[in-house]
Image (cartoon, rainbow, N blue to C red):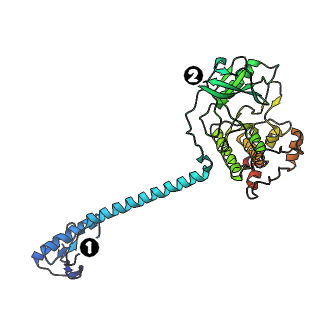
């Protein structure tokens, strides 16, 4: 072992080199080739212990006022742990608050009623005994695929519910009725997706003499509500309806369901703050075995579905186009028909759109929002929002 030794300056808590040291005041450093020379055996033991801890990287020694080193590594370790916990907790609070803020921003329209999304439901087959039309069959409305009547529906638990029944007309009188019913039944099955506050849920279907859809009774459709309102409708409520429809459509698409005929007439008013999308999946364009084309409302169709002599393939982007038309309807308060002059027929509408024609901005819609809606009408489906 080298004779090179170290001694302590007691008054300053530092070290200085020395070549000689009295044996009783020195001690070898474990694992080192030098000895430590201290003022006392107590100081020597303290410094050796301190140096061993330094080798482990646990702490830095602090000089005491009396010349000995104050070894407070346990306190330091506690401070470090507590500090780290405080940092982690602060980070947790930050991200928690940030996520809450983002959730409110994205779903602020849902503050009125956010029903819990329920597990996927099995399709409910109901009998005619569960449907009571009353003494007179009250017609609520009619559409391209049938008529809607008011009824009282008795659910499996025996509860009487005010409901609406859509009776689906056979689409082709000369077609195989059973085949057509099976196709519609498969479409109904696709409609039995987890519930969402902005998508109407089916109470059940009946496939006896008629094809019937049973759903909760709602007062009127969005188009009628907007057009017939006696009081001015606040702009922020129109914006809320648009946001709710977007939320509902995202839910449908997340379950691989296309609406295929989205428009203000296929959105129901649950109350003045809450809408529900209906009739999704019933009108998806298709070609029957005789080459005939059937689809939804052509004034709301994407340009690729209007293209002559081309296979029609419905995609999510087609619904996005229809969403843009629906927003246009909402901000026109349901009083105007899209392309009323330019697109009286599907062929005329295709020519108008193919030449770059598009809808005009509604007066009630802010100018800075219109470019986002126009993007829904992009000729290339891939660049739609």
Front of the two marks 2 and 1 = 2
- Give the residue number, with chain letter if any, for mark 1: 62
Neighbour class for label 2 at 10 Å: few (<14), some, many (≥20)? few
Q: Earlier in the sequence, mark 2 or mark 1?
A: 1
Kind of element beneath mark 2 = loop
Q: Is residue 299 left or right of residue 55?
A: right
Res 270 → quadrant: top right
Res 75 → quadrant: bottom left
Is 274 or 317 nearer to us in this picture? 274
Expressed as whole percent of the image width and height from the top left, the position of residue 144 reads: 79, 30
| Residue 263 in view | no
Expressed as whole percent of the image width and height from the top left, the position of residue 342 reads: 89, 45
Is 155 or 2 nearer to us in this picture? 155
Q: CA separation, marks 2 and 1?
A: 81 Å
Kind of element beneath mark 1 = strand
Expressed as whole percent of the image width and height from the top left, the position of residue 171 reads: 79, 25
For the N terminus, the image quarter is bottom left
Residue at image point 21% right, 82% down: 11
Identify whether 204 is placed above or below 364.
above
Q: CB of mark 2 within 8 Å of CB of mark 1?
A: no
Is 155 or 58 nearer to us in this picture? 155
Q: Is residue 243 left or right of residue 32?
A: right
Neighbour class for label 1 at 10 Å: few (<14), some, many (≥20)? some
Expressed as whole percent of the image width and height from the top left, the position of residue 343 reads: 88, 43
- Give the residue number, with chain letter if any, for mark 2: 158
Residue at image point 76% right, 45% down: 230
Res 73 → quadrant: bottom left
């Amino acid at each position: 072992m080298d004779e090179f030794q170290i001694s302590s300056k007691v008054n300053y808590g530092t070290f200085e080199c020395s070549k000689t040291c009295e044996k009783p005041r020195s001690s070898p450093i474990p694992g080192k080739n030098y000895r430590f020379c201290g003022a006392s055996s107590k100081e020597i033991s303290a410094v050796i212990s301190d140096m061993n801890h330094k080798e482990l990287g646990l702490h830095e020694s602090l000089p005491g006022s009396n010349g000995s080193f104050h070894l407070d590594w346990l306190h330091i370790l506690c401070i470090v742990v507590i500090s780290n916990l405080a940092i982690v907790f602060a980070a947790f609070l930050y991200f928690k608050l940030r996520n809450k803020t983002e959730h409110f921003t994205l779903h602020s329209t849902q503050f009125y009623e956010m029903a819990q999304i329920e597990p996927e439901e099995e399709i409910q087959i109901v009998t005619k005994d569960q449907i009571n039309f009353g003494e007179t069959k009250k017609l609520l409305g009619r559409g391209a695929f049938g008529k809607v009547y008011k009824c009282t529906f008795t659910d499996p638990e025996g509860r009487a519910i005010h409901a609406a029944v859509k009776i689906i007309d056979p689409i082709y009188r000369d077609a195989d009725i059973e085949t057509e019913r099976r196709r519609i039944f498969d479409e109904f099955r696709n409609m039995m997706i987890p519930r969402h506050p902005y998508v109407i849920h089916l109470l059940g279907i009946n496939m006896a003499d008629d094809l019937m859809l049973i759903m909760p009774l709602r007062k009127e459709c969005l188009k009628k509500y907007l057009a017939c309102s006696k009081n001015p409708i606040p702009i922020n409520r129109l914006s809320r309806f648009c946001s709710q429809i977007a939320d509902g459509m995202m839910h449908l698409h997340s379950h691989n369901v296309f609406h295929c005929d989205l428009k203000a007439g296929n959105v129901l008013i649950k109350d003045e703050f809450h809408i529900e999308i209906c009739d999704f999946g019933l009108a998806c364009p298709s070609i029957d075995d005789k080459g005939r084309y059937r689809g939804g409302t052509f004034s709301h169709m994407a340009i690729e579905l209007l293209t002559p002599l081309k296979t029609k393939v419905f995609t999510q982007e087609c619904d996005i186009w229809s969403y843009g038309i629906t927003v246009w309807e909402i901000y026109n308060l349901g009083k105007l028909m899209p392309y009323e002059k330019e697109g009286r027929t599907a062929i005329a509408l295709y020519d108008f759109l193919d030449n770059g024609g598009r809808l005009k901005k509604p007066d009630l819609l802010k100018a800075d929002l219109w470019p986002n809606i126009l993007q829904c009408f992009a000729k290339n489906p891939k660049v739609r929002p």
